[in-house]
Image (cartoon, rainbow, N blue to C red):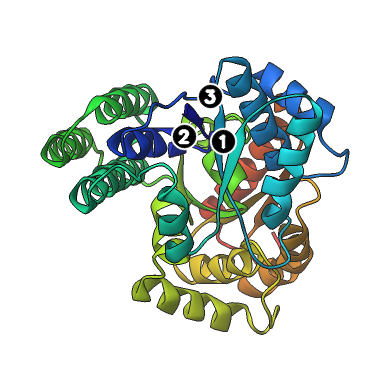
Amino acid sequence: MLITYPHMGTLAIVLKALFIGLGRPVLNPPPITKRTMELGTKYSPETVCLPFKVTLGNFIEALEQGADTLVTCGGVGPCRLGYYGEVQKGILEQLGYKFEMIVIEPDIVDVIKQLRKVAYQRSLREIYHAFSVAGAKMNALDTIEQNLTVLRPYETRLADGLWQQAVQAIDEAESISEIHNIVEDTVFQIGRNQCSDHKPLRIGLVGEIYVMLEPFVNQDLVRVLGTMGVEVHKTMYLSDYVRGHLLRKREYLDKYEELFALAKPYLGHYVGGHGLKSIGHTIAMSQENYDGIIQVYPFTCMPEVIAKNILPKVSKDMNIPVLSLVYDEQSGEAGVMTRLEAFIDLLKSRKRFGKVKGL
């Protein structure tokens, strides 16, 4: 059994730690490249969303290198994520690949049930330790990325270097105490170089989780905005998804109720994915005096298309500019950059001359 999984931000580091801890060899899929996207697009249904195509490309490249067990996630509700596993399995079988696919639904009971297939020779203590180390790496990576948010607008090169060092060190770390030391050291270095007098533009990032978290797909949006002097705050990290959808922590359930209440005047019911949250977060961030909002999502994503058509009304009512960026395999960096530059110019004008409604 040689296990592989798709990329989504730092997900591969977390899953690598988990499965190695459970005593199984893993094959990290090659980094996402143009070839990954081309392979996935070639064998995918034409109108399926981009995450399907890229993750299918991940699986093909991993299978080419000898993987025989694919781990992916399921889903519930109107979002097509729930169909990914079965449809991708059918496509790969038609291409002649031999493998087992493990589809983990967003429920902690199903997670435990499915992982028994790869951890049947491990004691409960060993399983607990594997989850603990993987969870510590997930939390550490998210904590460091969140702290880098305030450094990146004026020390982009330093922020990039600290992030790369931290990612490598956390990936190689073998104990929870070692992971905690890496976080403490990195956060200290961030604080030591932070400029308290700097007041950059603050933009909230809302939208679909895969596009938000995967730099190759969103064309390294957070870093690009950082080079433009913008402080970017994501509304979702991998740890948020795990705590909210898998562990169903009370704080995350309460937060969802708050977002639902904010969004209700515009959207009164669940539409799948993160569409309702995109609206709720936009309203919440306008109340927190953010300068603007960027919505990111893959072309044909049903929940975010619904949100996208509601956000202009929210933008007008809350007096906060909103830019929607749609990504597919045809998205060009030049076109996205042009829209970002125009949006940043607008936000700078509003900050300089006041937030005139309609500007």
- Sequence-first tag of 1 and 3: 3
Q: Are marks 1 and 3 in contact (CB under 8 Å)?
A: no
The residue nearer to you, when weighing 57 against 100, is 100
Which residue is disc 2 drawn over?
226
Instruction: Tell me how far mark 3 sits from mark 2, CA to CA.
Output: 28 Å
User: What is the quadrant of residue 332 in the picture?
Assistant: top right
Percent of width and height locating residue 30: 54, 19
Q: Identity of the amino acid at label 1?
A: Leu
Please identify, in this view, whether the residue under mark 1 or under mark 2 is nearer the observer.
1
Q: Is 296 above or below relative to 289?
A: above
Q: Is 108 above or below relative to 31?
A: below
Percent of width and height locating residue 238: 44, 49
- Residue 95 visible in the shown view: yes
Which residue is disc 1 drawn over?
70
- Sequence-first tag of 1 and 2: 1
- Residue drawn at x 71%, y 25% as measured from the top left: 37
What secondary structure is marked by label 1?
Answer: strand
Badge 3 crowding class, 10 Å Cα cut-off, few under 14, some 14 to 19, many 20 or more, is: many
Please identify, in this view, whether the residue under mark 3 or under mark 2 is nearer the observer.
3
The residue nearer to you, when weighing 193 against 59, is 59
- Left or right of residue 113, residue 294 in this image: right
Instruction: Tell me how far mark 1 sits from mark 3, CA to CA.
Output: 11 Å
Which residue is disc 3 drawn over?
29
